[in-house]
Amino acid sequence: MRRLQPQPSLSHIAKHIRALARAGAISFDQKNHALDEAAKDGFTSADIKYVLERCAVVEDQGSSNYRCEGRTV
Protein backbone atom coordinates (compact mmCIF):
# COMPACT_ATOMS: atom_id res chain seq x y z
CA MET A 1 0.00 0.00 0.00
CA ARG A 2 1.37 3.42 -0.99
CA ARG A 3 1.66 6.15 1.61
CA LEU A 4 0.16 9.51 0.76
CA GLN A 5 2.71 12.28 0.46
CA PRO A 6 2.18 15.16 2.91
CA GLN A 7 0.94 18.41 1.42
CA PRO A 8 3.71 21.02 1.11
CA SER A 9 3.47 24.01 3.44
CA LEU A 10 2.62 27.44 2.08
CA SER A 11 6.18 28.59 2.81
CA HIS A 12 7.55 25.66 0.78
CA ILE A 13 5.23 26.56 -2.11
CA ALA A 14 6.33 30.22 -1.89
CA LYS A 15 9.98 29.14 -2.02
CA HIS A 16 9.24 27.13 -5.17
CA ILE A 17 7.35 30.04 -6.82
CA ARG A 18 10.18 32.47 -5.96
CA ALA A 19 12.75 30.10 -7.50
CA LEU A 20 10.68 29.70 -10.67
CA ALA A 21 10.19 33.46 -11.00
CA ARG A 22 13.90 34.20 -10.49
CA ALA A 23 14.84 31.57 -13.08
CA GLY A 24 12.45 33.13 -15.61
CA ALA A 25 10.39 29.93 -15.71
CA ILE A 26 7.10 31.81 -15.16
CA SER A 27 5.86 33.58 -18.25
CA PHE A 28 2.83 35.70 -19.02
CA ASP A 29 1.03 36.16 -22.29
CA GLN A 30 -1.42 38.87 -23.26
CA LYS A 31 -4.40 36.60 -22.52
CA ASN A 32 -3.27 35.84 -18.99
CA HIS A 33 -5.88 36.42 -16.28
CA ALA A 34 -3.23 37.68 -13.84
CA LEU A 35 -2.18 40.42 -16.28
CA ASP A 36 -5.78 41.46 -16.90
CA GLU A 37 -6.48 41.75 -13.19
CA ALA A 38 -3.16 43.49 -12.49
CA ALA A 39 -3.78 46.05 -15.25
CA LYS A 40 -7.11 46.97 -13.63
CA ASP A 41 -5.11 47.92 -10.54
CA GLY A 42 -2.40 49.74 -12.51
CA PHE A 43 0.27 47.01 -12.26
CA THR A 44 2.49 45.64 -15.04
CA SER A 45 4.00 42.23 -15.74
CA ALA A 46 7.26 43.59 -14.25
CA ASP A 47 5.37 44.28 -11.00
CA ILE A 48 3.97 40.74 -10.98
CA LYS A 49 7.40 39.22 -11.61
CA TYR A 50 8.93 41.34 -8.82
CA VAL A 51 6.22 40.27 -6.37
CA LEU A 52 6.56 36.59 -7.28
CA GLU A 53 10.33 36.74 -6.81
CA ARG A 54 9.79 37.89 -3.21
CA CYS A 55 6.30 36.63 -2.41
CA ALA A 56 4.67 35.00 0.55
CA VAL A 57 1.89 32.54 -0.25
CA VAL A 58 -1.01 33.34 2.06
CA GLU A 59 -3.73 31.04 0.73
CA ASP A 60 -4.03 27.75 -1.12
CA GLN A 61 -7.02 28.21 -3.41
CA GLY A 62 -6.91 24.65 -4.79
CA SER A 63 -6.09 23.37 -8.29
CA SER A 64 -2.51 24.71 -8.02
CA ASN A 65 -3.80 28.26 -7.49
CA TYR A 66 -2.36 30.33 -4.66
CA ARG A 67 -2.84 33.85 -3.37
CA CYS A 68 0.54 35.56 -3.05
CA GLU A 69 1.39 38.80 -1.33
CA GLY A 70 4.40 41.02 -1.72
CA ARG A 71 5.62 44.49 -2.64
CA THR A 72 5.86 45.89 -6.15
CA VAL A 73 8.77 47.90 -7.55
Image: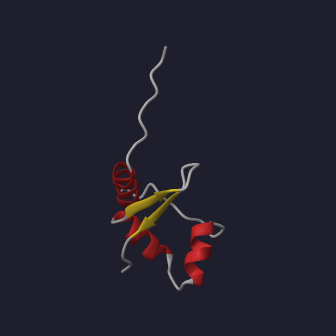
Identify the residue at the far top of this view.
1
Relative to the observer, which residue lies in front, 23 or 1? 1
Quarter residue 69 falls in: bottom left
**37 sits left or right of 7 in the view:** right
Residue furthest to the right: 31
Number of marks drawn: 0
Taking depth in this image into account, of 42 and 3 the one nearest to the observer is 3
- Where is residue 28 shown, x and y percent of the image? 55, 64
Would you say 70 lies left or right of 27 here? left
Where in the figure is residue 37, as x and y percent of width and height? 60, 75
Check the image and name the residue furthest to the bottom.
42
Question: Residue 61: image x %, image y %?
Answer: 55, 56
Give whichever of 70, 49 is nearer the camera. Answer: 70
27 to the left or right of 36: left
Colour option used = secondary structure
Which corner quadrant holds the C terminus? bottom left
**x, y percentage for residue 16?**
37, 50
Q: Residue at x 62, y 75 (%)?
A: 36
Q: Nearer the viewer, residue 61 or 49?
A: 61
Residue in the picture at 44% in, 54% down: 25
Residue pictured at 47% horizontal, 59% vertical: 59
